[in-house]
Image (spheres, rainbow, N blue to C red):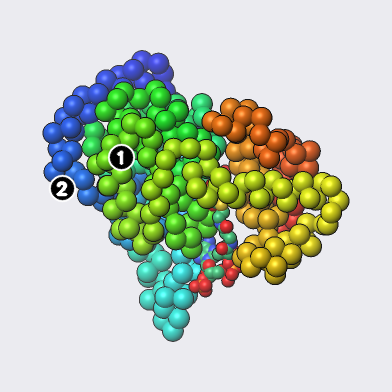
Amino acid sequence: MYKYTTASFASSRRLGAARSALGRGALYSSEASAIKRVAVVGGGQMGAGIAQVSATYEHGVTLIDVNHEALDRGHAYMAKSLARVAKKKFPEEPAVAHDWVEAVLGRVRRTTSLPEGVANADLVVEAVVENIAVKQKLFADIAGAAPGHCLLASNTSSLPIGRIAEPLDAPTRGRTLGLHFFNPVPQMKLVEVVRAAETSEQAVGRAVAFVKSIGKAPAVCKDTPGFIVNRLLLPYMMEAIRLLERGVADARDIDTAMKLGAGYPMGPFELCDYVGLDTLKFITDGWFKEGDGLRGDKAFAASGKLDELVAAGHLGVKSGRGFYDYSKK
Ligand code: CAA
Ligand code: NAD
């Protein structure tokens, strides 16, 4: 676990302010604007995917999580996913495929120390639990330890980037933005680049260049709840749960209907389980309580079925059970 005392936090903020001042001069040099070193905070399904893809495209990557077990899980996720990619890339050459996987994994350093992990990063991408207090504290800590030219990005699904950046000073808010990847990161081509009110044009430009450098397509958008994709996807997922609760059909038939009737690659319950039911609940509860323009919107009202599954620890694919049981697969 990170150990921050108030004193060390205050001194790391002073160090950050000094670095910020130093970094400002270098900000406009191409040396500082090119992103070569990426730190990813949170080695869960999203963080591990972001680290993997960054390393695949030759960036030096540091993956940071709270303990070694979480880092090991992230490593296992990357190894499994890279093996899948390598099998397609080098179908006739297993030895070459193996060496390629090892080379990519070799570009990902792992640490439980946040200050050390972000110390020389050009970009930090945060992918921890969907909780505003946790993210605000983390961004303050990152800002205190990362170089003054470093971009600070959140992979949040639903939280306003402007609120995550609230504890930061104005120059740091200028280089804070959303980089919203999609699950599974190695396969999904889109990254939403979220411009908060105070994000600088230069930060958006550098983020767009980074997204292209890892083979993804950027879509730049404003800092509004759900950005583009989740603002459309979440009402659909919640309405599917309400269809189930009203007894219109069972989960399997609703999934089949949307796959075969609407051409979706996954049905809504497969998708809920894939995203994670805890994440889905964090998003919808947050919007219902205080989402800008969404407060009290019944599309995001609590669902008894979802609450029941989350309370039982059935979080979807990542816990082995959600709407479906994955333990036998
Ligand atoms: N790592 C690497 N490659 C992967 C992968 C992974 N984790 N998962 C899937 N793939 C690749 C496979 O290797 C395969 O590649 P080829 O087509 O080149 O052979 C391809 O993806 C398809 O995989 P499969 O054949 O195994 O299975 P599938 O056809 O059912 O596709 C899927 C799997 C890509 C996940 C597909 O079902 C899909 O697109 N589902 C919808 C996913 C989606 O909507 N994601 C967004 C969720 S919302 C979100 O992320 C935002 C948020 O904030 C909550
Ligand atoms: P996850 O539960 O799989 O992983 C979260 C990881 O963060 C865990 O490994 C945990 O140990 C780590 N963590 C928690 N607090 C930390 C801290 N203070 N410092 C370092 N690491 C910490 O979650 P996920 O599904 O990868 O989601 C992560 C973020 O990405 C959330 O904000 C979520 O909304 C967003 N997101 C999720 C999806 C999805 O489909 N699951 C898609 C896009 C965006």
Say which residue label 1 marks. Answer: 151
Q: Residues within 10 Å of mark 2 (few under 14, many from 20)?
A: few
Farthest residue in the top direction? 7
Residue 16 as seen in the image, left or right of residue 141: left
Front residue of 81 and 218: 218
Farthest residue in the bottom direction? 92
Q: Residues within 10 Å of mark 1 (few under 14, many from 20)?
A: many
| Residue 109 in the image: above or below residue 203 | below
Residue 120 as seen in the image, left or right of residue 248: left
Find residue 30 and report its horizontal and vertical position in percent. 15, 48
Q: Secondary structure at mark 2?
A: helix
Which disc number belongs to residue 30?
Answer: 2
Asked if one can make out residue 224 in the rendered structure from this viewpoint, the answer is yes
Name the residue at 69% across, 46% down: 238
Quadrant placement of the C terminus: bottom right
**Would you say the beta carbon of the disc 2 residue lies within 8 angstroms of ligand 2?**
no
Find residue 60 and report its horizontal and vertical position in percent. 30, 52
| Residue 25 in the image: above or below residue 319 | above
Farthest residue in the front direction? 293
Name the residue at 51% across, 26% down: 133
| Dot 1 amino acid type | Leu
| Distance from Cα at disc 1 to Cα at disc 2 | 14 Å
Question: In the rendered structure, which disc, 1 or 2, sits on the residue that comes first in sequence?
Answer: 2
Which of the 4 quarters of the picture holds residue 142? Answer: top left
Front residue of 73 and 151: 151
| Residue 92 in the image: above or below residue 207 | below
Name the residue at 45% across, 81% down: 91
Asked if one can make out residue 73 in the rendered structure from this viewpoint, the answer is no
Find residue 65 and report its horizontal and vertical position in percent. 46, 40
